[in-house]
Structures are given as C-alpha cells and as structure tokens.
Image (spheres, rainbow, N blue to C red):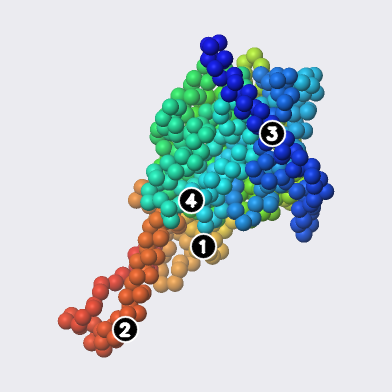
Amino acid sequence: HEPSQKLVKFPTMILGFISTWVVGHAATKTHHACPNKLLVSPTKQYRQPPPNSMRLYMMSTTFSSQQLDPHSFICVVLGDLHLDPSNMQEHLVARDVHIKDAMDTLEEQERAKLNKPDSKITRHVVSLGDLGAYGIAGLTSSFELARDYLRGFATSPIENRASYSILTGNHDLEGFQEFQTDRDNLLAWAKCFAETMVMSPSVNELPVFRFELNHETVLLGLSTTRFRDSPASSHEVFIDDEQVAWFEKQLAELQAQNKHVLVFSHAPPMGSNLRSLNTVHVKNQCAWLNHASGRRRRQVFLKLVKKYSCIKAWFSGHFHLSHDFEDSISLVNDSCTFVQCGVIGSDSARDHRRQTRIIAGNEHEFKIYSVNHHNDGELRLDATIHIDTETKESINFEPHPPENYGTADWFRAYTPREDDGCYLDYSELETSSDVAPAAAKVKKVCFWHMKDGRVLGVHDSMIIEYDAETLSPVGIVMTKEELNDRDVFLIPEVNALVIYPPRDGLDVEVVHPNPDGSYARQYQLNKRVRIERKSREKLAKKWMESHTEEMGRLEGAGRKEDAPFAPATTTASASASVSMK
C-alpha cells in the first residue's frame, strides 16, 4: 500500500487491536477464574474450555515486538466435523485444549530451532467439510455452528481476513429441508463463510481457496458442487471442470515460481493409495474425487500430481478412518504425500480413534503430526517430508510409524500390485477345444485383465472392479452376500465370468458388463431419487388404504378388462435381473 493508505488504516487497526485485547483479556480472566473445573467423562477428565464467544486466541499486546517468521508455519487440518449443537464437548476440548496446546508446543520447538524466541509462527486452520451432524447437515444452522467453531481458532486481529480456509464435503449440500437446488445450497454455504472470501466476485466465484502461508508455501482447496444432481450416489465428491481448470492454472503458476503446494479436498483422488472402505464408499462409487463421473474426470487429478512436482502433499477426509493404519499416509510418484485426516467426534469415528492432523513446516521440511484426542491430546509425529532448498523438490519421505507398528492393527488394505503374486495369468490356458473353451478357477485373492482391458479381482469374498491404470478399486461387481462363497471361473476365450453353482432357477450365471463396458454395479441411487421414490410409495400405500372396497371388488372381478382400478404393475425382480438362463 501507499504510505497515505497506511496512515488512514492505522487508527482503525489500533482500535481493532485494543478491542480484541479487551475480549482476550476477559477470556483469560474467565478461563483462570475456575482453573480446577473439570469436564467429566466415563474414562477421562478434561479442563473446562472457556465460552465460545471468549476463546478467540487472538495475539496479545506483545504482537508489536514479535516478528512473523517468513518461512515457518503451523497448519491444522480438520477432518469431517459433523458438529452437533447438543453435543459439543469433544469438539470444544479438542479445539481449546488439545489443538491449542499442540500448536503452542510446535511453535516453541520452531522458535528454539530458529533461535528466535521473539518470532511469531503463522497459524492457519483448514476444514475439509462435512460440517453438520446427520439431520442438520447442509442447513444454514450447521454452517453457522461451524463458522462459530472455526472462528475460535482465529490468531490475528490485524489481518483483515479469517485465519481459516474451508471447502465443501458431500453432506454440506444435503440441506433438502431448506434448499431446492445444489446451487442454492452452495450459495448459502458461501454466504455464511463470506469472511473467507470464498466464491467472492471480487476474488473468484468458484468454491475454491488459495491461501499463501508464507514465502514458499501455498494452500489450494477444491469443493464438491453437486448432491441432488449426481447421476449415481449423491455422496460422490464431484469437482467440476471449472475448478479443475482453475486448479491447473494455479499449479502452473506456482511451479514456475518454485512454490510448495499443499492441496485439500474432502475425498482423495483415485490413485492416492489411501485406505478406502470397499463395503461403503467403493460399493457406492463415492470413494474418490469424481468417482462415478467417468475415467477422464476421475483420473485427471493424479495426472496433475505427476505433472506438477510442486504438489508436496494432499490432505483429505471423507472415510472417517484414523491415522493408525499403514495406508493412512502414502507417497505417490516419489513427490506427493497423500494424507488421510480423521475425525474428532466419537459418533463419527469408525475405529474409535479420534484424531486431527497438524502440519509444521519451514523451507527445509514439512512434519505431519497427529493430535490423538482419544489419548488426552497426545501429539505424535507421523511423517517428515524433506525439501531441497535449492531445487524445491521433495528429496526424502520419512514415515514415523505409531506404536502399533507391526501389530495386527497395523496393515495396509489390499489393493492389487503387479508384484504381489496375486495376478491371474491365463495366457497358458489351452484355446478352445471341441468340447468347451478352457476356464481358469479364480483364487480367493487375485486379480486379472479381461480381454477388453478391464481389471477384475476377488478379495474378501467379493468381486471388485479395479482401475486399469492405478489398480484402485472402482466398484463392487458382486457383494459378499451375492457371491455367497461360490466359485468363480474365468473363460478368457469368450471374455466371460461364470459363477458356480448358479443361483436357483438358472442354468448358468454369467457376470455381464454394463452398457458402457464397465462391470461395477450401481448399488446406491441418488438421494433425491430415493426420497422421491419413497414419497410415491407412501402416497400409493395411502391411496390403497383409502380404496380397500374398490380393490376388494377388483379382486372379486378377477381382474377383467372392464373391471375398475386395474393398474399395470412390474416386479422388482424382473427389472433387476442381470443373469441369463
């Protein structure tokens, strides 16, 4: 800014600073008035966090004597919050005690390393979306609750912007009770978080963010934009083409400037090698970004990772899984580290571990930590990404396995790999004979290429389709219940997959490809479609109950052509048949 502009802004800054100090001072007094007050749970006791309106963590009056270090930063990454206004204790303790203490500890370590006791380290928070609890998700009230919660992480009263960045998760567009369209839902979300400048016409009308942490590091965030309009599962995290174009433009610019880029999205891209749940997200084709939107759209992200080495790490949530698995952190292309982010709330945790990620970085390295809320906020180092300060390239990825390393709890979920010994090679099978073509019996864990290039496999008593390029799971062809421990035979000559013995009433049971050539089945319809179907069924049932006499006469008439109320019907079993007799 010009000097004259600084002079105009200076009194306003001072007034804002003084008022913030007063609030902070009041918060301190409130906090210390009852230092021994405890929050009681069945197994643990926590310090009582101060009221929401007070705990802002603003800088104190020492700010003027402190210098912001140009290279160091601390970034908190919050997984799926699913905040419930009637049950905020775990989230408040996590924010006001565990995460605050962890940031203080990391800042002290960085100051000691720099030998600059008066330096100030940039702090920032990123929310990966899914803000509201089930039942209020996607409603304005859930956005307002999350906004108040995220404001509690604010660190600077002088910067004219919030200290957090935000993106949407699939549940953030689920506000059916309040909004008719995805666009209306998205605009309401953006309006609530206008202080972050998201979708601001003066900055960018897309639901993305770009935040420059320091001289070297830039954060980029991408949001899902559809729920009601999804062609398959509403829970697919869909990044539209406009965001992808913006994303690549940013990457090209930042790579040319030798910047480090950290990327954030609600779900990870296909090919990240992070753990996913076959029976939930893979089955419903909503595990990966643009999962059900075709090969081009779902593969574009990994292509960008391979093209732009400036992407040092990519953080995502969505799965509600902890950080205590081997594949919760994964290095891809020797340049990008993909990181799974857990949850704070026990109602959301799939494996009873409640965790938050923190990144502590400088020009030499990025350290990735877990804050273990289930263990009194223990701070644990999980991995270090070492950076060459001259080339700006990642030169070493150093994992730091947790204490359960080597135990039965520490394992990588199976995904095919070319050298894992599970590939079904049928090249030596005899060709067709006068009797019948040769077939290969499929093992309990294996994968193979169909003649059309599709990759199928058997794992955990399911038939799964995998992506031909990354070998990531695409979808379920047959569930465990459908396969029911039966044998699977591959007949390469006719490109057929046969299940034996066949289901009752069938002479032969063949797994056929879909019209587009894929094999994965669509098990979950768009939620809007499901709601509309249930509504029609409810109205139909109500109509039937109010016309019992007419329906009785219809039965007595033997469904003659001239009988009243003779609707045409179809059966679900007939319309859903996929096997041939």
Q: Residues within 10 Å of mark 2 (few under 14, many from 20)?
A: few
Mark sitting on residue 139? 4
Amino acid tagged 3: Val
Amino acid tagged 2: Thr
Cα separation, mark 4 vs mark 2, equals 40 Å
Point out the tag, 4 or 2, that comes first from the N-terminus.
Answer: 4
Amino acid tagged 1: Leu
- Foreground pick, 226 / 89: 89
Amino acid tagged 4: Leu
Q: Secondary structure at mark 4?
A: loop
Cα separation, mark 3 vs mark 4, equals 33 Å
Q: Which residue is mark 1?
A: 483
Q: Residues within 10 Å of mark 1 (few under 14, many from 20)?
A: some
Mark sitting on residue 22? 3
Point out the tag, 4 or 1, that comes first from the N-terminus.
Answer: 4
Q: Which residue is mark 2?
A: 548
Q: Residue, x 80% and y 19% (percent of image)?
A: 115
Q: Is residue 251 left or right of residue 11?
A: left
Cα separation, mark 3 vs mark 1, equals 66 Å
Q: Secondary structure at mark 2?
A: helix
